[in-house]
Amino acid sequence: MIDIKSVVANNIIELRKSNNWTQTELADKLNYSDKAVSKWERAESLPDVTVLKRIADLFFVSVDYLLEEAHAKEKKEARPKHIRRNHIIITLLSVSLVFLIATIVFVVLGLLPVDLPIWMTYIYAIPAVCIILIVFNSIWGKRVWNYVFITILVWSILLAIYLSCIAKNIWLIFIIGIPAQIIILLWTRLKFIHKRK
């Protein structure tokens, strides 16, 4: 007789590792604790039916796939690559749209008789791109990348302010970035546990 706990455990492990996720990352996506995921993967307990459905949806497989001991590889690998590619394309389209708007503003300001450094439109586009990357990464990506994007966001805003207001002692604005960077680094050390009953 097949031990269903072991079959489900092996399938969850295989799917999680094929996506390069840690137990904590999988737990975060399911709003469960990493201890619960660990118990499932050690075959000490089984997720309930609704959680099995969420796991199946997360990995783009059927619930049957999680319950089967042997299955074809193409079933689980065909769709995630396609979805991942679409996520990347959507993100790149959004970033390109920001730079298209920056370019339009650059051209319009270049045609007008204004005495402004029009190249600054591209500097102002960097924080907007960072916000887009943070949003899409929060939905589709790994949480660790958000810390990188937030760091770039903070320093690019400070750079934009500095370049916009070059005056005596304006360089002091970069001192704001030091405690902001410390906060970001400390934030990366937090462990988020979502427990469900």
Image (cartoon, rainbow, N blue to C red):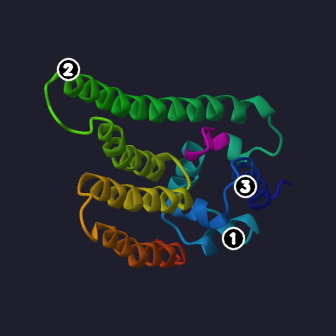
At numbered mark 2, what does the secondary structure look like: helix, strand or loop?
helix
| Image quarter of residue 26 | bottom right
Tell me which segment is drawn in magenta. Answer: 58-64
Q: Is residue 140 above or below residue 25?
A: above
- Taking the image as shown, residue 140 lies to the left or right of residue 62, namely left
x%, y% of residue 77? 71, 34
Residue at the image position 48 percent from the left and 49 percent from the top: 137
Residue 136: image quadrant is top left
Query: Foreground mark, 2 or 3?
Result: 2
On whether residue 59 falls in the magenta region, the answer is: yes
Depth order, front residue of 169/67: 169
Q: On the rendered structure, is 115 left or right of 85?
A: left
Pointer 1 and pointer 3: residues touching (CB < 8 Å)?
Answer: no
Q: Earlier in the sequence, mark 1 or mark 3?
A: 3
137 or 184, nearer to the observer: 184
| Mark linked to residue 8 | 3
Q: x, y (%) of residue 152?
A: 45, 57
Q: Residue at x 63, y 75 (%)?
A: 35
SS of the residue at dot 1?
helix
**Which residue is drawn at the image coordinates 56% and 32% (left, top)?**
83
Residue at image mark 2: 111
Query: Closer to the camera: disc 2 or disc 1?
Result: 2
Q: In 3D space, how far apart are the residues under numbered discs 2 and 1 (Cα atoms)?
A: 62 Å
Can residue 45 be seen here? The reply is no
Disc 2 residue type?
Leu
SS of the residue under disc 3 = helix
Mark 2 vs mark 1: which is more N-terminal?
1
**126 vs 183: above or below:** above
Residue named by callout 1: 38
Give amino acid for label 3.
Answer: Val
User: In x, y percent, where is residue 87?
Assistant: 51, 35
